[in-house]
Amino acid sequence: MNEYATQQSGLIVANYGRHFLVESPSGERRICHSRGKKSEGVVGDRVLWQASRDEGTIEKIEPRRNLFYRRDEIRTKSFAANLDLVLVLIAAEPAFSSNQLSRALIAAEAEQIRPIIALNKSDLGNPFARAWDWLAPYRAMDYTLMPLSLRHSAGPDKERLLEHLQGKTTLVLGPSGAGKSTMINLLAQGASAQTGEISQALRAGKHTTTSTTWYWVDDAKSGALIDSPGFQEFGLRHIDPMRLASYMPDLRRHTGNCRFYNCTHLHEPGCGVLAAASPAFGPSGVNPDRYRIYTELFAELSQSSY
């Protein structure tokens, strides 16, 4: 049998459209191409590939545990597959969007991936205190929230982060200016070296710049961080509007009190969510900002379902 005919296992660690960087179990990295016209691989995929001279061809993508992605009216953007955690990194400054945060959390819930919210720049005093207070509804949903000061207390923050991330495959999301690069360099040993190795494997710009990259957290390769590009919009067109409330924990805990099984939680009599969104319900109810996000998303997703 020809030495190139044997299929080998590998892990996609970077994605360049129809080109991928695949790592073998021994740590060797090689550029591989999709078989045919379709390009369905994403970072985190386990694959079978076949060598061809100094590159390779992906022959099969192994079944995924999950796929974190967003979809708008034009296209679908896949971030990564086979995740244990999605870490959403935001900062006291610049101000973050509650809408975008909620959308990322909903996408994680839909794929049954545990989210963590990290708020950076705790050294900023009042701006941080305001942002931390604003996140109170998310703490009430039992999400893990972590205060960080990545520039000024790297040692303690690194230890606390690693407690959550060790042994896990974690996708890091965050807007520009939140400190994503600082976090990756802090947690991933030799992240800059790994980036250099990728550039060398790509032979100085032969392929386009990566949009999503895998970094090992430790030498034992027991955990990994996946760095993703920042995003201005996070489409959820793949979400069924009638399932939306089930992906929002603060609404979900009240849906069992609805009179009708197919309640939209917008206008029906006897709706548990509407009752919980009323100011008279008290502190255990649904936050007004969160309910506003629900109604706006429901309208958006209802339009896209036709």
Image (spheres, rainbow, N blue to C red):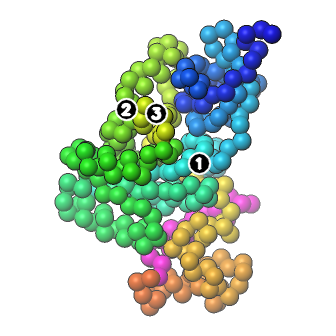
Numbered disc 1: secondary structure: strand
Query: Measuring 41% from the left and 20% from the top, which residue is drawn there?
Result: 196
Q: Quadrant of the C terminus?
A: bottom right
- Residues rendered magenta in the picture: 285-306
Question: Which mark identifies residue 189?
Answer: 2
Q: Amino acid at mark 1?
A: Phe
Residue 45 on image: x %, y %: 63, 36
Q: Nearer the viewer, residue 31 or 208?
A: 31
Q: Residues within 10 Å of mark 1 (few under 14, many from 20)?
A: many
Instruction: Using residue 39 as the reference point, say whether residue 214 is left or right of it.
Output: left
Q: Are marks 2 and 1 in contact (CB under 8 Å)?
A: no
Residue 82 on image: x %, y %: 60, 44
Q: Nearer the viewer, residue 153 or 77?
A: 153
Numbered disc 3: secondary structure: loop
Q: Residues within 10 Å of mark 2 (few under 14, many from 20)?
A: some
Q: Nearer the viewer, residue 207 or 116?
A: 116
Alpha-carbon span between mark 2 and mark 1: 25 Å
Residue 160 on image: x %, y %: 33, 52
- Comes first in the chain, label 3 or label 1: 1
Query: Measuring 64% from the left and 90% from the top, which residue is drawn there?
Result: 269
Q: Outermost residue, front direction?
A: 220
Mark 3 lies on residue:
220
Alpha-carbon span between mark 3 and mark 1: 25 Å
Q: Quadrant of the N terminus?
A: top right
Visible residue check, residue 77: no
Visible residue check, residue 59: yes
Mark 1 lies on residue:
68
Alpha-carbon span between mark 2 and mark 3: 11 Å
Q: Are marks 3 and 1 in contact (CB under 8 Å)?
A: no
Numbered disc 2: secondary structure: loop
